[in-house]
Amino acid sequence: MTTVRILEPRPGAPRRLVCLPHAGGSANYYRGWATRGRADVEVLGVQYPGRADRLLEPCHHDLHAMAEEVCAALLPALDRPVTLFGHSMGAIVAYEVARRLEEQGHGVHRLVVSAARAPHDPAHVSVRDAVWNDESAVRSIVEAGQADAELMADPRVRELVLPYLRADFELFQRYAHRPGPPLACELLVVRGADDPHVTHRQGELWRDLTRGPFRHEALPGGHFYLAPEPPLDLYLGPLGPYREEAPYRETAAREAPAPASRAAGSAAGGQFGRQPAQVGAAGQAGLLQQAGDVLLDRAR
């Protein structure tokens, strides 16, 4: 199966948007982005191994190895200007992909990092000594509502979902940023103003990682502020002048370190952590959808 796939062919589009999923996510999460009326952009999704149509392939347990795979698969798509987008864990993978492409003399036009702490931030993982717990992880992803809980109660779904959730947790826990030259590309940081896992100060740390144009925006919402309507015009439009006073709401409590948690959820920058109901439902939609898709495929 291919690592990078075109979600909606647009051979005449002058540029490409390549999307890397969050932990537990798949390329299917971005399928709707390809049909939102932007004829000037061809949307590609990255499919990590061990999920959806790559379910039988072994999961990565090293983020640098994941980035190497994506980088190699992305090379043929660089015949047009590329915006590289990653959400949460996907933002860190996207950053590492951008670094490797520049090292090889290629590079992308823009890197968009969404809902993620900077990789060189000592707190990019909330609880480094957290231990994976299946039940805690399931409770975290079903908090949004009864329908999700029913699906996750199905042992067949748990058998499909938990292995790659666990692998992503371990991958993120083991990741360590390797110092190197800053990127040359544009860097856009976007986060939810109500996301307790990425504060304004933490978003600003991304500025250290590029010598190109930089912008930092906070939008209404939490960790999954981008659902159900992703701000594609922001991701793809001109960066414009940087605004020192970003539209965010901070409190002293949000700047304080997150309390330690026994659940694996708190570790990956909040990726598996509890979210408000409407936010969690949107964020886990791709995960639950792919589980349902695989079950349907097996039933046929």
Image (cartoon, helix red, strand yellow):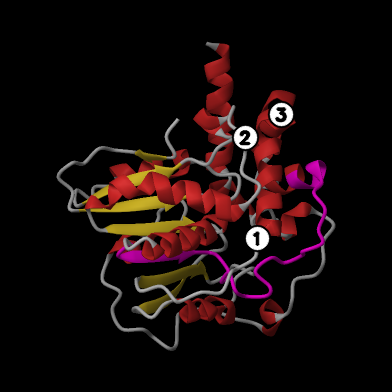
Q: Quadrant of residue 165?
A: top right
Q: Which residue is mark 2?
A: 58
Q: Residue at x 54, y 49 (%)?
A: 66
Mark 3, other Cα within 10 Å: few <14 / some 14–19 / many ≥20: few
Nearest to the eye among marks 2 and 3: give it. Answer: 2
What's the CA distance linking mark 1 and mark 3? 25 Å
Q: Which mark is residue 159?
A: 3
What's the CA distance linking mark 2 and mark 3? 14 Å
Decide if residue 264 is in sight here: yes
Nearest to the eye among marks 1 and 3: give it. Answer: 1
Asked if residue 71 lies in the magenta stretch, the reply is: no
Q: Are marks 1 and 3 in contact (CB under 8 Å)?
A: no
Q: Amino acid at mark 2?
A: Pro
What's the CA distance linking mark 2 and mark 1? 18 Å
The residue most toward the top is: 300
Q: Secondary structure at mark 2?
A: loop
Q: Are marks 2 and 3 in contact (CB under 8 Å)?
A: no
Magenta-drawn segment = 108-137
Q: Residue at x 66, y 52 (%)?
A: 171
Q: Which mark is residue 175?
A: 1
The residue most toward the right is: 262
